[in-house]
């Protein structure tokens, strides 16, 4: 597997944690068990509030996760495809051609 395709897969892992605030395969600690699940095509489930959300940001992130977690690396998105999809999604949410990327730290 080319290194860039592995990186895209790993980005999916990060997106999953950001969307769910959970680790992959929560509660399973044995690496071989996780490996077998991944080889069998299993993925960590999305919580209902994420899976069923109509929020545009969740819709975009779910699609991005699918792009990253495509099992066959030959069909997996490139990092450029993922970045373009996320930026297009941000444009569609904000309605701006060149949206600022901002972090809002509310406490």
Image: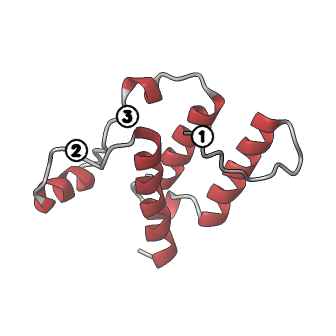
The span from disc 1 to disc 2 (Cα, nearest Å) is 28 Å
The span from disc 1 to disc 3 (Cα, nearest Å) is 25 Å
Furthest toward the front, the residue is 107
Query: Which element type, helix, strand or loop, lies under badge 3?
Result: loop
Residue 73 figure quarter: bottom left
Q: Nearer the viewer, residue 105 or 77?
A: 105
What residue appears at the point 20 percent right and 59 percent down from the top-left corner? 35
Q: Is residue 43 above or below residue 48?
A: below
Residue 34 figure quarter: bottom left
Q: Of tags 1 and 3, which is closer to the observer?
A: 1
Earlier-in-chain disc, 3 versus 2: 2
Is there CB contact under 8 Å for labels 3 and 2? no
Earlier-in-chain disc, 1 versus 3: 3
Residue denoted by label 2: 26
Which percent across, then down, holds residue 76? 51, 58
Q: Label 3 crowding class (10 Å Cα cut-off): few <14, some 14-19, many 20+?
A: some
Residue 54 figure quarter: top right
Q: Which mark is residue 32?
A: none
Residue denoted by label 1: 106
Which percent across, then down, holds residue 21? 38, 42
Query: Which element type, helix, strand or loop, lies under badge 1?
Result: loop
Earlier-in-chain disc, 1 versus 2: 2
Q: Is residue 24 above or below residue 51?
A: below
Residue denoted by label 3: 46
């Amino acid at each position: 597997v080319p290194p860039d395709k592995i990186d895209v897969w790993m980005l999916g892992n990060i997106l999953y944690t950001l969307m769910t605030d959970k680790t992959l395969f929560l509660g399973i600690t044995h690496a071989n068990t996780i490996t077998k699940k991944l080889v069998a095509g299993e993925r960590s489930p999305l919580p209902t509030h994420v899976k069923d959300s109509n929020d545009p940001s969740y819709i975009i992130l779910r699609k991005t996760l699918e792009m990253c977690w495509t099992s066959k690396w030959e069909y997996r998105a490139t990092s450029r495809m993922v970045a373009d999809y996320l930026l297009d999604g941000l444009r569609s949410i904000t309605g701006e051609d060149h949206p600022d990327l901002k972090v809002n730290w509310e406490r």
